[in-house]
Amino acid sequence: MKITEDSPSALTALDRPNSYIGRSVPRPNMARLMQGRAQFVSDVTLPRMAHAAFVRSPHAHAKIKSIDSSAAKQAPGVVAVVTGAELSKVITPWVGVLTHLKGLKSAPQHAIAVDRACWAGEAVCAVVARSRAEAEDACELVQIEYEELIAVTDAETALDAKTLVIHPELGDNLTFERVHTAGNPEQGFKAADAVVETTFVFGRHTGVTNEPRAIVADWNAGDQRMTVYQGTQAPHMMQNLFAKHLGLQEHQVRVLTKDVGGSFGIKVHTYADEMAIVALSKLLKRPVKFVADRIESFVTDIHARDHRVKARIGVKNDGTITAWEIDDLTGIGPYSVYPRTSGIEANQVVNLTGGPYTCPNYKARARVVFLNKNVMCQYRAVGHPIATAVTEGLVELAAAKIGMDPLELRRRNLIADDAHPSQGPSGIKFEALSHHAALAHLDSMMNYAGLRAEQAALRQKGIYRGIGFASFVEVTNPSAAFYGVGGAKISAQDGATVRLDATGAVFCHIGVTEQGQGAEAVTAQCVASAFGVPIERVRVIMGDTDNTPYGGGTWASRAAGIGGEAAWQAGKALRQNVVAIAGSILQAKPDTLDIRNGVVVDRDTGKERIGLDEVARIAYFRPDTLPTGVQAELVATRHYVPRAWAFSFTNGIQASYLEVDTDSGFVKLLNHWCVEDCGTVINPQLVDEQIRGGVVQGLGAALFEQCVYDDRGQLLNGNMADYLVPMAMEMPDIECAHVVTPTADSELGAKGAGEAGTAGAPGCVMNAINDALRPLGAAALTDMPFTPGKILRALGKV
Amino acid sequence: MSEHRCDIKLTVNGETISETVEARTTLVDFLREALSLTGSHVGCEHGVCGACTVRVDGVIVRGCLMLAAQCDGAKVETIEGVSDAGEIADLQAAFERRNALQCGFCTPGMLLTAQELLRGGGVPSRDKIREQISGNYCRCTGYQAIVDAIEAVAQERAEAKR
Ligand code: FES
Ligand code: FES
């Protein structure tokens, strides 16, 4: 284990000469993005392409009594007007369940609503026209008669006997329930000197990717093939689903993902309107494009969080935590989202609560209920921000109650760094974590003692600053335990194919995808290092189901840890193949040779023997000069899936320093720190930027972001003027550092880093706000987002 | 719909363009759809995100809040033109070095917005830089890397002037 700062670490044991592992090399794809020459799906145009727009239900719950599209069909430019019933002949409905989430249930969902709309924003009719503007014009002419039904919008009463059951065939509005007890919570609470009990509330929010969801589907009736340009995180998963629901073979579907304008989990799900687009293309035998506009994004992009967690912690006067208890309730939409389901986030809350700590006494219940609101599903850091804020909120409230420093209480309860392998109270298994090393590093990095002194001095002047912390664990590098075992065709493994071209450069085709996080750079670093070429000679091909090995794509912080390992192994395999051919050209034993910097060298002396360009020239153009029976194999493929551990947990701790204006209720973020351990750091700058971006998304959740619904199920702030996102002025600079505990599951030892920032930031800010306001006697704030109004109410000022 | 169409003549990245546009067509839609200049992006269509930022007569505007018809006689510059002219090559290099973009969707707008501040000369404070880009939404980076890159270029340019 070692601590690394922002700057590149010293080279690790993985290092070969000219290794790029641990170096902040720039990403290869940036120039086109900066020059306006990227190709986002919203930029794609094809010959004969038509544009779709949807008529969406204005009601949260309504029977569709009739649809009159005659006027719309006559409107200028209109190609077709298609209802849900008509489209259901082309594409079959789906049900979002997983068998390993026992009892999880949902109802069939159609691409376009048939007979009934179940949330305000659900597509009820599609219009396809020559231009989007004409399609939208014609949407206005579609006459739909609705009969409004009672909308179920309150999770707290969704299970009451007198509440309408949204899908009567399911019997009730309960999507999923999990109950878990470990150790002896009852005894734990009895043994406590103090018990803290409170309710945490997490606002419903959404991803607001800068590029909205976009898709172009092109059914070529001549080829009998469907080509789909889609901004997705999981092309092979989508290939499977498009084929399955259109009644095609998988090889008849090609999914192409070029540049994607932000994903964060928003673009890893099946969206009804995108399924409608592939079906419309099949129906109309021409390309059809759909780009959600921002207003549509707010009512159709998955929402997330929206949890109410009643929670308790028991603690002794010496700081020992004796028991945890949580009761989580979350209201999703009318359907569990396909195929990853809407039960995963609550399940994660149960899995992760109390995760960093030794206390084994734990009682948990989580319930997921259907509501007539937009669908909810996995968004960056799934469940982590909730479990972390609950755990860390309880820890700091308990520390305050027994009068102990919050870092000291953590020191006394965090799992020891030398106690691994270990497990959390829910039974999640940890290979190796470094909570104490991370905490110690944070303590000195932020100058904790100095800040406390400053805080005390400023309080005398009526300035209220707060310091808050959040220790956390993060699920990364998921094995098949996440989805595969539950029956979803979502690949846990990924493959990489590397190929030497005729000039000695290398292509790498890989199943993981680029969403801006830097997967392309990391893949190139792994291949260049393992094979032995300058990184400029590696070209990475991603996001094309016709041309990459089958893989899971990018989610759950898996691209670097899983894709990177596949690339590393493939690079090594190709090196062996090439060295074998070089050996027969040079009449040397292959194991005396190596490849460094694009040249075959003597392994021991480093003496240059033959360039890769020359090896390639001979192998491709003059194989006749090779000894008889020698066949050059200049392509190598390797796959990787984590096997020893279901997940590769990372850990870390964040701190927030902020000031609350007690007159206005505004919070000013002054500083933020994060020390985390994602194992081997392949590219320090990319890891840090993942952390920073993730922290800022978490800060949005803590302070600004919330989809506000009224009790009739209408979203009241579904636009970017009213739904607040973090902008540059309000955000602090963020300091990052790393402890490095590689996973032994892979040679590279890299774990994921994409979600740690988002996991810890909200709880950390909550704790800092409460720390600031504690001397004023304010009741603890536990209801996110912490708006000025809530802060003033807690201070009794309004 | 002929009464809703207008003829416009303008220059875009130095090229003279004469087109007939629907009155309701926004500048950014015109650039993207009629001229295939897809470097200007559409993030919100209501003036909040800044992804559609372009220059009209030397001043940055939101391409989604301006109509193409209002640009008759104007000089329009987009990220493609400004890049090719080499005007922001140093800024682009700094963005690359500092990884000041992830998905890159906000980047064209961010670069043009930053260049407007940098053209004013001097080395602005980090707060001033944050204020300048406060109307440009970036979901990926958390902004710090962008501020760092802009600050570095301001310093380089000030250095070079000395
Ligand atoms: S698209 Fe113009 S400001 Fe968002
Ligand atoms: S880099 Fe993705 S929005 Fe800024």
Image: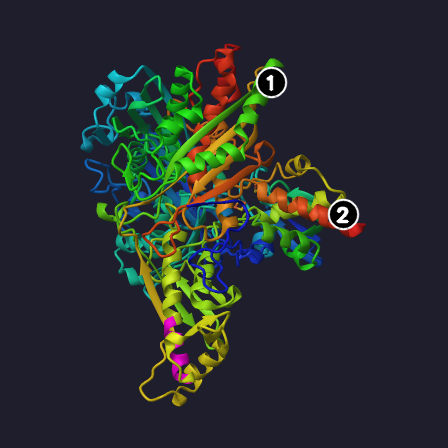
Could you say which is closer to the camera, residue B83 or residue A289? Answer: B83
Q: Could you say where residue A264 lies in the image, as x and y percent from the top left?
A: 43, 43
Residue A596 drawn in magenta: no
In-image side of A477 versus B1 (left or right):
left
Closer mark to the observer between disc 2 and disc 1: 1
Q: Which of A557 and A194 is in front in this view?
A: A194
Q: What residue type is labelled 1?
A: Ala
Residue A216 percent location from the top left of the image:
43, 54
Q: What element carries label 1?
A: helix
Marks 2 and 1, Cα distance to the nearest angstrom?
39 Å
Mark carried by residue B158: 2
Q: Quadrant of ligand 1?
A: top right
- Tell me what residue is drawn at x 49 percent, y 50 percent: A516
Label 1 crowding class (10 Å Cα cut-off): few <14, some 14-19, many 20+? few
Residue at disc 2, secondary structure:
helix
- Going by the numbered disc 2, the residue's amino acid type is Ala
Badge count: 2
Res A35 visible: yes
Please tell me which residue lies in front, A666 or A521. A521
**Residue A547, relative to residue A385: is it above or below?**
below
The answer to if A577 sits in the magenta stretch is: yes
Residue at the spot of label 1: A457
Q: In this view, does A617 lie above or below A77?
A: below
**Residue furthest out toward the right:** B162
Q: Give the range drawn in magenta.
A: A576-585
- Measured as percent of width and height from the top left, residue A493 is found at 31, 55
x%, y% of residue A110?
Answer: 29, 43
- Chain ID at mark 1: A
